[in-house]
Image: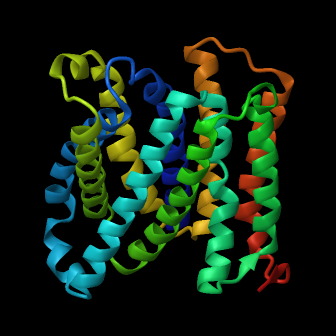
Amino acid sequence: MSKSISLLSALLCTLIWGTTFIAQETGMKFIGPYVFNSVRFFVGFLAILPFVFLFEMGKITKTISKDKTKFFCYSILIGVFLFLGTVFQQVALIYTDVANAAFFTIFYVPMVPIIVFFLFKKKIHLSVWLAVLLCIIGGYLLTNFQNSTIRLGDSLVLIGALFWSLHIIYIGKIIKIFDLPILIGVIQAFVVSICSLILGIIFEEFILTNILQQKIQILYAGVLSGGVAFVLQIFAQKNISPAPSAIIFSLEGVFATIAAWIILSQILNLNNIIGCVLILCGVIISQILPGYKKISYR
């Protein structure tokens, strides 16, 4: 049952992430990427903070006492990884389109098992590599990348994908030790907001009227994505290891495409549909085949 709940949490998280792409792109009409990121994650921080007091306050002291230094180091570290992943992605949307951004973001799928394999010497099931290949091909078909040009923004998204990978890996490590998904989510949202605030003060302007003009996008990207979705991610990774988690999270490209179809009336062509099917197959393979222990290697 706990594995099923984690899978549902991962899918809901991914649905929110996928639909947030639209809010991220349209949310920079009057404000810069650093201001958007700072306000977005501060809103997310405020949205989930009360739930710490409601659901986790009674066990915080006991849980953290296992290793306070490790808890705070890991919490800040994943906050920094999340900041770098989101800020590279957000800035990239100025220079490239959503199609390219979605495709290059999916590169965290192969990066996660590669990093886990070489840094931590962890066994990776052969089915994960098959699922990774399907997700990359599916992402390529899903985003119409063959009709786009490579720009500076694409390189920024690719760099961001590295930090998304590290974020997923270290979420998996911290949640196995400290069962405080909401508190971890609150800390990382605050870290992202503060780091983005520093860049916003240096390079941009915080103009309240401009921020309020983007309130719908900020609320959606803040409360749902910056707050709820990242807590769901942490909860999901309690029972799903990093490599399969990354494959499930790659479904954000599918949800982004469907959202664009429904909200922006963008037509799905045959390549898009095949891409969706391939990513879905990759997710299913990553969850079913690992049960067959014989198909694994170091």
Give me the residue at 29% from left, 46% from top: 196
Direction from residue 238 to residue 209 in the image, left or right: left
In the image, farthest residue toward the top? 265
Residue 91: in sight, yes or no?
Answer: yes
Q: Is residue 164 above or below residue 298?
A: above
Residue 250 x %, y % = 64, 48
Q: Is residue 39 above or below residue 292?
A: above
Residue 43: in sight, yes or no?
Answer: no
Direction from residue 280 to residue 260 in the image, left or right: left
Direction from residue 207 to residue 196 in the image, left or right: right
Q: Is residue 208 above or below residue 134?
A: above
Residue 12 x %, y % = 50, 44
* Colouring: rainbow
Residue 112 x %, y % = 62, 66
Q: Nearer the viewer, residue 76 or 130?
A: 76
Give me the residue at 85% from left, 83% from top: 294
Q: Nearer the viewer, residue 106 or 194?
A: 194
Give me the residue at 64% from left, 18% from top: 261
In the image, farthest residue toward the front? 202
Q: Which image quarter: residue 35?
A: top left
Give me the residue at 56% from left, 45% from top: 156
Q: Classify the position of the C terminus by image quarter.
A: bottom right
Residue 256 x %, y % = 59, 31
Q: Is residue 268 above or below residue 103?
A: above
Instruction: State the count of labels.
Output: 0
